[in-house]
Structures are given as C-alpha cells and as structure tokens.
Image (cartoon, grey):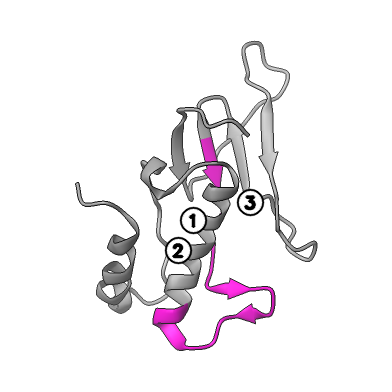
Amino acid sequence: MKRRHYKKMLGAMALALPGVAGAAPLEYYNEGNPPTRPFTLAVRAGDYIHLSGQMGTDDKGLVPGGFEAQSRKAMDNIAAVLKGMNLSMDDVVKCTVMMADMSKWGDFNKIYVGYFKPG
C-alpha cells in the first residue's frame, strides 16, 4: 500500500453505511491475523483508519511476564498493524485505552508514552 496522508484513529468504533451516496469504499487490512480471531485488524473508511483493539497476546495467547510485558506487547501489536499499512505510531492522532484496573494507569502510561514522540 502506498503511504498516504490519512487522518488516523485508534481504538474507536465507526459506523459505515455502504451504498449511501458519497460514502467512501471500505478497505480492510487483516495481514497476520490468525483465523481464530473473528475481527479485522484495521479498516480504512475515507480519510480515517480504524484499528481494532489489541491486547498483550501473541499466537500462543497471553504473553508471560505480567502487566508490563502484556502492555508492551499490546502496543507492539498496534505498531505492527500500522507498519503493515506503511504507517507508524507517528501517524496516530487518537487512542482509546481500556483497562480493567485503573490503579495500573500510571504503570501503563510509563510504557505508553515511550511509543510516541514528545509533543
């Protein structure tokens, strides 16, 4: 895929209405997604690319090493999907993070900010 300058969103839900006049065709990205995972990794709809949420898993399941290792793997999974689309974390403009235990937010944020350039 040729690199284009799209507005990107990460981890957000989108509604597309195919067949509606003026609606952009959807483009799906699913490279490397195991067949056991019933979701598409990313969808481009017009000027936006929406990524499915990621967890700290690999082909074998939840990665060992606890919260920090799983947080890094989730972020690495996001970066891998973007790379497959000729994009990077520099192209992300919005993220939505969902955590089961908000007391871990500070621990997660220390990892999270390392994936983005300052500013």
The crowd level at tag 2 (other Cα within 10 Å; few <14, some 14-19, many 20+) is: some
In the figure, 105 relative to 9: above or below?
below
- Whether the magenta-drawn stretch holds residue 67 is answered as yes
Query: Looking at the picture, does residue 44 appear above or below residue 67?
Result: above
Q: Say which amino acid is labelled 2.
A: Met
Position of residue 108 measured from the top left corner of the image (x, y, whole percent): 33, 72
Q: Position of residue 116 (x, y in %)?
A: 31, 54
Gap in Å between the C-alphas at discs 1 and 3?
A: 12 Å
Q: Nearer the viewer, residue 85 or 49?
A: 85
The answer to whether 33 appears left or right of 107 in the picture is right
Q: Which mark is residue 79?
A: 1
Dividing the picture into quadrants, the one containing residue 113 is: bottom left
Q: Residues within 10 Å of mark 3 (few under 14, many from 20)?
A: many
Element type at mark 3: loop
In the rendered image, residue 37 lying in the magenta stretch gets the answer: no
Magenta residues, as a range? 49-69
Q: Which residue is mark 3?
A: 41
Q: Residue at x 70, y 58 (%)?
A: 32
**Is the residue marked by circle 1 packed among few (<14), some (14-19), or many (20+) residues within 10 Å?**
some
Q: Position of residue 28 (x, y in %)?
A: 69, 39
Residue of label 2? 75
Give the residue at x 39% y 80%: 68
Q: Hey, what amino acid is under mark 1?
A: Ala
Q: CA distance from mark 3 to mark 2?
A: 14 Å
Element class at badge 2: helix
Q: Label 1 near label 2: C-beta < 8 Å? A: yes
